[in-house]
Amino acid sequence: MSVDFVTQRKTIRGYGWPTAAEVRNAVSVTTPGDLDERFRGAIAEFTGPAAGSWPIAEPARADHDAGAEARPAAPVRGAGEPLRAGARLTCGEALTLFEAQIASRHLDLAARWLRSFNEGYYTIGSSGHEGNAAVAGALRSTDPALLHYRSGAFYLVRAAQSGRDAADAYRDVLRGLVASAREPIAGGRHKVFGHADLAVIPTTSTIASHLPRAVGVGFAISRQAAEASAPQYGEAIEAEWTSGGWPADAVAICSFGDASVNQAAATAALNAAGWATYRGIDMPVLFVCEDNGLGVSVRSPDGWVADVLRSRPGLHYLAADGCDLVDTYEAATTAAGWVRENRRPAVLHLATVRLMGHAGADAEVAYRTSAEIAKDAQRDPLVRSAQLLIEAGVVDAAGVLARYDEIGWQVRTLAEEVIGEPKLATAADVIAPLAPRRSARVAQTIEAAADAVNEWRGCARVGFRWPPARARRTAHARPGDQRDAHRRVVGVAASDPFW
């Protein structure tokens, strides 16, 4: 693909950015407008065996199940046929993943647009990492996920898997960008991917800090399954896990960037997961390293990340081209199936690219050459997914561009809506969810939760159900308070060295 595609327009679909031609001579960077122009220029050159229009879902009718799979409007290949010979990814699945990739790209463009007039506060995007849509597609909606901050496409696919309306998923992300108090997981305190209904556990921007948590989730899944089958607890606890816990065969998914492998938390997590394998402890965790070769402005040495991950004892290693939808889906399906069956950890190493700078304020020209930037642009996963679909005859170029513009307009409209939503106005608003600062109040809260658990234990012996989850939650406390309360809950002796 040439890097000189230019469409002479004065604005980019209403965002008001200069065209690629106007910015290319000024500085060698990838701007939002440039990214948009390159995509359009590339798609215009693709041709397929037939010009099938974009598959449009028929509206639900009274005599049809409203939740039934949408029927495509006479594509050349059927929705259930493989997109590529011998591939597990079908044409229908590929279209769903591609729409999430498109939406993720437009959310990145919207983030830069909002920031341009000080209404957006977060510009780290997912452009170049949209292949993680295929990772989400290879997993179940009930698999707990702790996501890298470039996981826009994954989040949108997970929302679709869970039956969430696409517009609501777009709005979730946009609310994080503008620090809306209505954002579903952080409430305007930070931009993260997280939603309780989607089994997406929020993380922080501290790189690799969520990897140890993923190991903990994997261990919890294995302990949960063991407890559920324990004869002393009987059917009561088994029913509770079934209704409120992770499925017994769940896989914890944890994605991170290549530079994170150098962080102490990542080293500890990968070590702990491998150690569990050698100890015979179930640890169903799938680590996904999205390797774009850069840690902000520092290059990862050639071969370093692969060697670090491949050499980890106790971890099953797989690799794929993260810019190729079919290749990523194939590897992710294999990896997830292996972890689910063997209850052992694995790492999936995806080769990706980073399009645009690390964030809006990053001048990548300071540490990358024009040739390096252009080389990554030619691996744009959005372009490559569109090419796959067009060349397979599933849809034509005009249909791709029409759908691209349709989703873009929807994202832009929602972005304008969330700008006016309320934000946290005071320090008291910001800290409201925090646990009590006084240790006495913390202890009282934990005591109440411990009493509820002990009361359930007595009930379980006569066949009653566990109380609801809200009765089992405890407030955050000092480490000593938590350990003491847990001893009381599970009956651990104070002298036990584990505690």
Image (cartoon, rainbow, N blue to C red):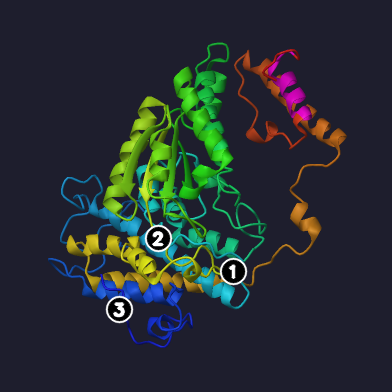
> How far apart are the two marked residues, 1 and 3, measured between alpha carbons?
34 Å
Quadrant of the image occupied by residue 381: bottom left
Q: Name the kind of residue labelled 2 in the image.
A: Gly
Task: Give the class, few, some or many, for how many residues have Cα within 10 Å of label 3's Cα (few <14, many ≥20).
Answer: some
> How far apart are the two marked residues, 2 and 3, measured between alpha carbons?
18 Å
Kindly tell me whether residue 386 is visible in this rendering.
Answer: yes
- Tell me the mark number nearer the camera, choosing from 1 and 2: 2
Residues marked 1 and 3 touching at CB (< 8 Å): no
Task: Give the class, few, some or many, for how many residues have Cα within 10 Å of label 2's Cα (few <14, many ≥20).
Answer: many
Query: Residue at 72% across / 34% down in the picture?
Result: 474
Badge 2 is on which residue?
A: 128
Determine whether, in the image, residue 473 is placed left or right of residue 106.
Answer: right
Residue 209's spot in the image, x, y percent? 59, 43
Badge 3 is on which residue?
A: 5
Choose the circle earlier in sequence order: 1 or 3. 3
Residue 45's spot in the image, x, y percent? 22, 74
Choose the circle earlier in sequence order: 1 or 2. 2
Badge 1 is on which residue?
A: 418
Residue 126's spot in the image, x, y percent? 46, 59
Residues marked 2 and 3 touching at CB (< 8 Å): no
Q: Name the kind of residue labelled 3 in the image.
A: Phe
Question: Magenta segment range?
Answer: 480-493
